[in-house]
Image: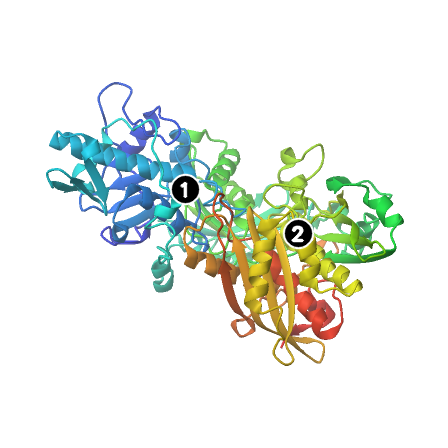
Amino acid sequence: MLPRTHKDAAMNQHVMPKLNRRAFVIGTATAGAGLALGLDLPFGGPAVVRAADGAPEVNAWVVIRPDDTVVIRIARSEMGQGTLTGLAQLVAEELECDWSKVTTEYPTPGQSVARKRAWGDFSTGGSRGIRTSQDYVRRGGATARVMLVQAAANEWKVPASECKAANSVITHTASGKTTTYGKVAEAAAKLEPPADVKLKDPKDWTIAGKGLKRLDTSDKTTGKMVYGIDVKLPGMLNAAIKDCPVFGGKVKSFDEAKIAGMKGVKKVVQVGDSAVAVVADTWWHAKTALDALPIVWDEGPNAKVSSETIATWLAEGLDNAQPAYIGNQNGDAKAAIAAAAKKVEAVYNYPYQNHATMEPMNATVLYTPDKCEVWCGTQNGEAAFAAALEASGLPAEKVDVHKLMLGGGFGRRGMTDYVRQAVAIAKQMPGTPIKLLWSREEDMQHGKYHPITQCKLTGAFDADNNLVALHYRLSGQSILFSVRPEALQNGMDPAAFQGVAQAGEAAIGYSVPNLLVEHSMRNPHVPPGFWRGVNVNHNAIYMECFMDELALSVGQDPLEFRRKLMGKHPKHLAVLNAVAEKIGWGTPAPQGVYRGIAQVMGYGSYVAGAAEISVTDGSKIKVHRIVASTDPGYVVNPAQVERQIAGSFVYGLSALFYGGCTVKDGRIEQTNFDTYNSMRINEMPKVEAVTVPSGGFWGGVGEPTIGVAAPAVLNAYFAATGKRIRSFPLRNQNISFA
């Protein structure tokens, strides 16, 4: 077992989950569903599920210790975005507990499966961590509160309606009697949960809706936090791996004898048909031996693919004669364009991007014929669990995944390739814990990349300079085609239209009499993945930069031009107006400073951004200031929203200036941060967040604002130089931060 990361008495800290064997057996035997609140053993009599320290579980979400410490179990993954704290706030709000005594822990997916998915969806991606679990975690908190109050009422022999709870204290209003949650938790845990509970109106929140400090910050700054890379188990060995550098290639042969005598080497194993791993006493010994290992690759049919051949293929998809899936249309755009008084056309392209998480992919596995345990950072504990099941060949009751804090997710740790590899290695050394750690080079060359796309945009005006038609033709890679083909709709990837869709959580914000948005799907051999912000990133650049092009082609202000098209999109317009006001769009900018603006919808939220920049020698950009506005419906932690907005600009601007992976001889050319850079703190602009939550819906926060980072800066760059950039990253144009 891993050591506890904190003292049990510590408040407001995240600890690793600990259920004792009896608790797990009880949970396994429980026939509860939904929130798994029915915890009576089938052979009769009430029973209490206990945490490792013996504290009773009131329900699947809440454990309360005698000292009133409240342990809230969170299934979603914390990866720097604040989901852990936000969900804990929502549970605590309904629970009416003392926030200073709240701690959190992760249940394991194995425990969840054994209890009929008591904790719901473990997946943490698409900015869904809070918005798609807020309802059932709030119900978990509210249900636990009702049971605690009922337990106190039973002890006092009074109606529960005469009792109220606040700050972990229950009061009988008529007599003034009080008790605490810790004193009645044991009795509460034996009660039948209520069939239904009423949730608070967000306007009455006292814990949720507040900018409370994150629960995980202190341990990250002191070094107490345990990441996947930190795992140490008795007798553990370390593995380094090398997969065929050409995607789709295989291992032809390797000469194990050449490294057999190297220091620390224990074993060389083939992993699947495309990878080789060296297991040694330390990771450095494993990597050193792996680098010395002669491997012959069968590079397969993709060995001659290059960025140039991919670009040529995608460019063919921009031809209207080529087949395409229609994602959004009204009127007859092609006919309107043909008959228009004026036509404007532009072609943009966006490259592959690597997630480049600070912590490379890793997983630790202990495999025996009777048990397979995995320790790893993952965005989806259930997906990692499923991968371990498949790779181990063991039944579900003999497999489990222990989620650890992860050093960067951004969509990459929603994939499970590294888990499968680790299990495959451990399976060849039963009984010995194996920690697999990718090198940075392996991480760069075997990512799941932001998809490569090109886009041809055509706008048409009538004689009075009114926009009458817009044709948006995307050519490029589909993530779902590769990752989740079952999610395709008659072959179409609906996610490809994020930000320009007809409706839904990433809908277009403009009304044009004749509109055609289509996708010519072309899938190169480079594996795509859900890179933070996903398809909103390039679609926002294409649409928002082109909106500026359209406005300026008819001599109109970019803001006013947009406003005229947004009458039927009040929420899009509201966030646009908010940033325009904050940046001072209608007033002159400081001398030498130029402005750009953009808006988009993504992940259920409406966002806009405005940038102020200056340019030296046409190629050195100083981003002075970015204003971002968001309407996510409800805000659980406003301080976290602000931090996520600022963080999204780090990611978005790094991609704009530095990002971009190229292909040569079938493989990714970038191998480390010397060839795949990220912005530095001195390059970071001042970020001003404007939050305008309109209520009534739950939108995402972490990803939406990434989309407006690049187009706001690019539009400002045009205002400064008169030069339109349509190909990225900017380093390829010899443009850099000042």
Q: Residue at x 74, y 66 (%)?
A: 725
Q: Nearer the viewer, residue 396 or 541?
A: 541
In this rendering, the answer to whether 49 lies above or below 335 is above
The tag on residue 566 is 2
Q: Quadrant of the N terminus?
A: top left
Q: Quadrant of residue 651?
A: bottom right
Q: In the rendered view, does 393 fall on the left or right side of 107?
A: right
Front of the two marks 2 and 1: 2
Task: Give how far apart the Cα atoms at labels 2 and 1 are.
Answer: 39 Å
The total number of labels drawn is 2
Residue 277 appears in the figure: yes
Q: Nearer the viewer, residue 532 or 220?
A: 532
Measured from the top left, where is residue 684 in percent x and y?
54, 70
In this rendering, the answer to whether 738 lies above or below 707 is below
Q: In the rendered view, does 139 fall on the left or right side of 257?
A: left
Considering the numbered disc 2 on the image, is that residue within a helix, a strand or a loop?
loop
Q: Nearer the viewer, residue 722 or 272?
A: 722
Residue pushed farthest front?
A: 464
Disc 2 vs disc 1: Cβ atoms closer than 8 Å? no
Measured from the top left, where is residue 214 in percent x and y?
37, 56
Which amino acid does the dot numbered 2 rest on? Met
Q: Quadrant of the C terminus?
A: bottom right
Considering the numbered disc 1 on the image, is that residue within a helix, a strand or a loop?
loop
Measured from the top left, where is residue 24 in percent x and y?
31, 33
Q: Residue at x 33, y 32 (%)?
A: 197
* Mark 1, residue position: 75
Q: Residue at x 42, y 32 (%)?
A: 117
